[in-house]
Amino acid sequence: MTVDTGADLHGWMTDLFPICRSLTGDGVRETLAYLQELAPDMQVKSIESGSAVLDWTVPNEWNIRDAYVADESGRRVIDFAESNLHVVGYSTPVDAIVSRAELDEHLYSIPMQPTAIPYVTSYYSPRWGFCVSEEHRATLGEGPFRVVVDSTLEPGVLNYGEIIIEGDTSEEVLLSTYVCHPSMANNELSGPVVATALARWLRAMPSRRYTYRIVFLAETIGSLVYISRHLDELKRNVRAGWVLTCIGDDNAYSYLESRLGDSLADRISQKVMDERENSYIRYSYLERGSDERQWCAPGVDLPVASLMRSKYGTFPEYHTSLDDLEYVTAEGLQGGLDMMKDAITLMEANRNWVTTTLGEPQLGKRGLYPTLSTKESTALVMNLTNVLTYCDGNHDVIAISDRTGIPTGRVLEVIERLAGPGLIVPAGT
């Protein structure tokens, strides 16, 4: 089986970090092409600008070649080549001479974070602008300045990636991540690299109960495009799903519930967090902010939650240049990847079981009852009989664990022992 480590993922992220991504354009295509090399079964798809998508319209395609602010001597005092965060996303073309006062109307910085370049976009209102740190802003001088944004904003396409890994059934797990932000590591690239590693791990499994649908989208508009094209099959097949974002730093783990908080994805998320983390932060759906807004929207109603490290919007590096390759670590990515593997492993194993005997079975004749009574053997028998008690066809593995207090991994071990001699069978067989 393919075993990608956190160090491998950090290496992929390092390669992808310099690419200028946005909702559309060459940066998205370059990013998807890189990930496609790692997961060759990815299909890259597109939809034309101007297409009506539910209540939205696909925007024009934006591409940028260069951008800068130069002083009177021609020296570039702000340079897109140094950081693609220096330009407001979707900036319209401009080549003009401006005063310092005019420039300030198009400058964005964060006084409370003087060393950070902010991430600013203007997708649906045409404007141009530059982003700098507050310290940098103070050094610009009085001007006049030449401002240049060498960009195009014209009809094109919006691209997205899709991986379908078939299982033994048509029931699906949805994994969603986004590829629409420029050089930010946790908020942008941690999700796609973890999703790609999961695709490689899933593909290498000898068998899978579920079919896995993994999508790499532009946040919001991309998920709306996908819903508009696949809503019927998503509603028919998806049994659980997760948004993969902000999953690579070293801080606390987080779980954001689905809209109603009672889906299978919620139950698995809570169980995984309870069993693998001494402390984690649980967020209400009212604190949402990523594509769970679309997957869980009324009328769509997919069972999608989010498992993260530091939730978007809660760490000071968020949406700034401080969200860099040092903020996200190989260890943090490994933890995020392992957390999602735990969730998928439980998803695959979780099912209802039913006993095949009427009344309590005789464990001894099946080699399940110890011949020597000790404190340890008594605990073993209690685990066997307690799990068996709830193999009534109405309790899945998570419910049995909740009822008995036995960790899910141990419940599965007990189920394997009971299923071996045929004392229990999957419900419905």
Image: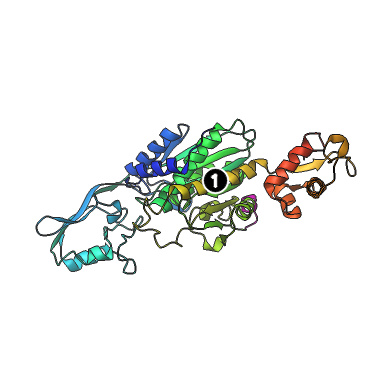
Neighbour tally class for label 1: few under 14, some 14-19, many 20 plus, Cα within 10 Å? some
The N terminus is located in which quarter?
Answer: top right
- Say which residue appears at 53% left-offset and 45% top-offset: 175
Residue 191 visible, this orientation:
yes
Task: Residue 93 in the image: state x and y as whole percent.
Answer: 23, 52
Q: Is residue 83 left or right of 417 when viewed as pictured?
A: left
Q: Residue furthest top?
A: 206
State yes or no: residue 298 in magenta.
Answer: no
- Say which residue appears at 34% left-offset and 69% top-offset: 112
Residue at mark 1: 338
Task: Residue 156 in the image: state x and y as whole percent.
Answer: 34, 42
Q: Residue furthest left?
A: 73
Residue 425 visible, this orientation:
no
Q: Start and end of the magenta stretch?
A: 261-267
What is the basis of the colouring in this image? rainbow
| Placement of 109 over or under 401, stated as above or below | below
Q: Residue furthest right?
A: 359
Amino acid, disc 1: Asp
Helix, strand, or loop for circle 1?
helix
- Of residues 361 and 104, the one nearer the viewer is 361
- Of residues 106 and 307, the one nearer the viewer is 307
Task: Residue 105 in the image: state x and y as whole percent.
Answer: 24, 66
| Placement of 111 over or under 251, stated as above or below | below
Q: Is residue 150 left or right of 273 when viewed as pictured?
A: left
Task: Residue 252 in the image: state x and y as whole percent.
Answer: 51, 58
- Say which residue appears at 62% left-offset and 58% top-offset: 260
Q: Is residue 26 left or right of 216 when viewed as pictured?
A: left
